[in-house]
Amino acid sequence: MYDRGLKPPRSNITWIQRLQQRWREGIRHKVTPLGAMILVLLFTSGVLAFTTTQNVFFLLFSLLLASILISSFVNRLMLAGLEVRLDLPQHAMAGEPAACSLIIENSKSWLSSFALELVAPVGRRFFIPIVETKGQALVPVEVVWGKRGVPEPVVVELSTRFPFGFSIRRTRVAVRVGQALYPSIREEAGFRNVLSQIQQRAAMLSASAEAEFSHLREYRSGDDWRRIAWGKSSRGGSWIVKETTSTAEDFLHLGLEDHAPDFERTVSLAAFIVWELQHSGIPFRFDLYSQSIAVVDRRGAYDVLSLLALIKPSPLGTLVRNSNTFLISSDSIDGPSSAR
């Protein structure tokens, strides 16, 4: 949201602080070369008007002074009533370029804002010809945050020299980001070895799982021929297969040591493993505290990454575990880890 936030609430400031604010705003009000020329002409016409008492110089002085006052007033109105919002992609990750959208909304119902210039957090400048009344303008920007979680507010700068270009009025806007960033899923040294251990454990658990008969159904393309019920198939005239279910609903459980010495690297390791396992099609459950998330597709992986985005180290955490839980920790990067 739009945040003049660099200023304290108006109701809690003293007249000295208000004067300091006005002074800082004046510093951000820059006179252009054209404006400097107009000021010189204003001064010159004023001197000539009061020394010669000629009406033409008084008229010129009045026109120049009115132009400057109107320009300053309209200049200020262009930035009034503007709100800035930063929208992140649905699945933004730390360390990866995020294609964000800076949305400038004009809350004024009677006046459009013209000739705006926006300086994005990455330093790029964008020119916005108009933001209509009760309308908005969208500026695509690419931002990279290095840490997971809710990012710090980003500062953008809005400026305008409308209507006459005599001066440039600037204002800084601190835009809060309300969405958390997933941890990075990039591979680091030692991550692939831990992933191999987990894949081997998943294969062992899958091979040892016992299957129980569930029901009969018609054959579908890709079914194993060894599951065909030959007796039923011969009597019915169509292929019938036996449907089975596993006695082990989930072959593998993953947990996170949430008080590891190198906690951030452990979280990155967990994010990497979760992403690689779902990409390989290996089903598992991620257990942490009172939550247990089943991951069988990308949607489940995003649920786990959302949990990892905001997790904090806690020595009092209690994990949901069973005999198949593989505890991800910083120690498992350097050496083999066992189920706990």
Image (cartoon, rainbow, N blue to C red):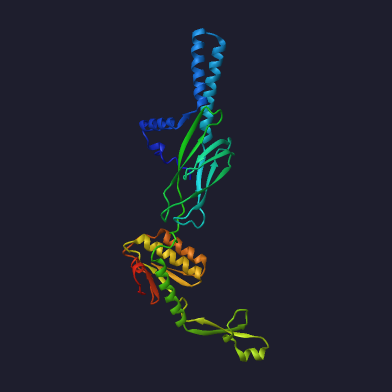
Q: Which residue: 68% across, 88% down?
A: 237
Front-most of residues 162 and 265: 265
Foreground: 61 or 19?
Answer: 61
Residue 152 vertical placement versus 310 (above, below): above
Residue at screen point 40% across, 30% down: 23
Q: Residue at x 49, y 21 (%)?
A: 39
Q: Give the answer, above or below, for where 201 lies relative to 259.
A: below
Q: Where is residue 213 in the image (x, y as percent from the top left)?
A: 53, 85
Q: Is residue 264 left or right of residue 279?
A: left
Give the farthest residue toward the front.
Answer: 189
- Kindly indicate the quadrant of the structure image that contains residue 57: top right
In percent of width and height, residue 317 lies at 34, 65
| In the displayed structure image, the side of residue 259 where residue 45 appears, left or right | right
User: Who is closer to the viewer here, 170 or 272?
Assistant: 272
Q: In which quarter of the image is the C terminus?
A: bottom left
In which quarter of the view is residue 324 placed?
A: bottom left
- 336 relative position to 199: left or right: left
Residue 212 vs 50, above or below: the answer is below
Question: Between 235 and 277, which is closer to the camera in this rendering?
Answer: 277
Picture mark count: 0
Whether residue 47 is situated above or below residue 318 in the rendered picture: above
Where in the figure is residue 75, as x and y percent of width and height?
Answer: 52, 31
Q: Position of residue 247 (x, y in %)?
A: 47, 81
Q: Residue lying furthest right in this view?
A: 237
